[in-house]
Amino acid sequence: MSTGTEAPAPRRRLFVLLPLLVFLGLAGLFLSQLLSGRDVSEIPSALIGLPAPQTNLPPLEGSSLPGLDSKSFAGKVTLVNVFASWCAPCREEHPVLLGLSQDRRFRLAALNYKDQPENARRFLGDLGNPYQAIGVDPAGRAAIDWGVYGVPETFVIGKDGKIAYKHVGPLTPESTRYLLLPQIEKALAAPG
């Protein structure tokens, strides 16, 4: 016996099937992302292909190195590494940076992010200094212009002064060999 308040059978079926259809749609979307081969850990940068931000940071106090000046990028490939003494992953990647500093085809510069000068000097004194220039960004304002998410990050700046590549996170021997060095080679081969 019907009370007249029940939904018609096709409508009831829709209410039962709707959650299943939504679930299947979401599962298909997630599966397509997994099978796409795209590196989901890679954070794209809106600055790739654009001129490096105008930067003129003072040098690290007590250091004989110049500060970070974007005008110095012209005509040579430059790696800009964002680091801080308080950053544990920066300490992990430091041996890789020391190795990269031996390659004279490009310049290795640093943006010292929200750090105390004495701590940064101690960090470099203990681990070695791979940089040819170190600009100090105590408030993190320049890092915002560079689109920095956190430390460490490394940028490849082409001879034309444009950002060619951005690596988020610590450099490892593997990421350097398979990701960073091919980008450096590409930047070196490009016209200035």
Image (cartoon, grey):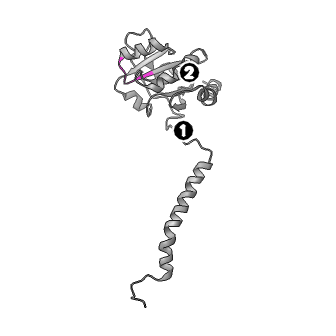
Q: Residue 18 location, x and y as percent? A: 50, 69
Image position of 10 with respect to 156: above or below: below
Find residue 82 and name its label.
none
Q: Residue 46 location, x and y as percent? A: 49, 38
Circle 1 residue: 42
Amino acid type of the residue tagged 1 in the rendering = Glu
Which of these two is toward me, 77 or 33?
A: 33
Q: CA distance from mark 2 to mark 1?
A: 20 Å
Image position of 16 with respect to 180: above or below: below
- Front label number (2 vs 1): 2
- Specify the quadrant of the image occupied by residue 83: top left
Q: Residue 187 location, x and y as percent? A: 61, 26
Quarter placement of the C terminus: top right
Circle 2 residue: 96
**In screen coordinates, is 182 left or right of 5?**
right
Image position of 125 with respect to 55: above or below: above
Along the polypeptide, which appears first: circle 2 or circle 1?
Answer: 1
Start-end of magenta stretch: 111-116
Q: Residue furthest front?
A: 1
